[in-house]
Image: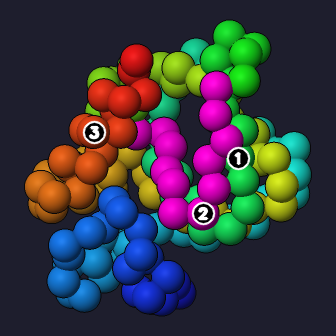
Amino acid sequence: MWMKIEEFRSIVLFDGLTDDELAQCIEPLKEHELVAGSSLAKQDDFAYKFFIVLDGDVDIHRDFEFVARLGPGEFFGETALVNHEKRNARVTTHTRCRLACMMGWEFKTMTEKFPSVAVHIDAAVTEREV
């Protein structure tokens, strides 16, 4: 495994998981480093990845309006995957970033296998749909 469990232990998404469960969740994650200004997701594109910010900040824009800035420990890309819809926002790196991402089918497996993770995902989807 290329990423250490300790790096993910403090992320709310994984609260309550044992080390073994957490290891299973993060196993499919791939690390990416990007420069500031990189495009991660485009509004109205098909969704196929889920992201966790490890270092740096990303900006969220919807209909060309700034919505939020997410930092280390926060995640994005879940709403379109959960709702089986196209992306509802554009995401770009605000600073140099290190991200962890997994494919949609890996995300689905994780949320089905670990209900506590699904609860955190569902809460984020509900909050972000407002």
127 and 29: which is toward the camera: 127
Q: Is label 2 in a helix, a strand or a loop?
A: loop
Label 1 is placed on what type of residue?
A: Val
Label 2 is placed on what type of residue?
A: Pro
120 and 36: which is toward the camera: 120
| Residue at x 68% of width, y 68% of height | 55
Q: Is residue 43 visible?
A: yes
Q: Which disc is residue 80 wearing? A: none
Q: Image check: 22 left or right of 28?
A: left
Q: Is label 3 in a helix, a strand or a loop?
A: helix
119 and 106: which is toward the camera: 119
N-terminal of the two: label 2 or label 3? Answer: 2
N-terminal of the two: label 2 or label 1? Answer: 1
**What separation in Å lies between label 1 and label 3 (alpha carbons)?**
20 Å
Q: Image check: 33 left or right of 115?
A: right
Tell me if residue 73 is in the magenta stretch.
yes
Q: Is residue 33 positioned above or below 111 on the image?
A: below
Q: Which residue is mark 2?
A: 72
Q: Image check: 34 left or right of 80?
A: right
| Residue at x 51% of width, y 55% of height | 74
Q: Residue furthest top?
A: 63
Q: Is residue 86 positioned above or below 101 on the image?
A: above
Q: Is residue 22 positioned above or below 52 on the image?
A: below
Residue 60: x, y in percent? 66, 32
Magenta range:
67-78
Tell me if residue 94 is in the magenta stretch.
no
The quadrant in which the N terminus is found is bottom left
Q: Is label 1 in a helix, a strand or a loop?
A: strand
The quadrant in which the C terminus is found is top left
Q: Which residue is mark 1?
A: 58
Q: Which residue is mark 3?
A: 123
Q: Residue furthest right?
A: 36
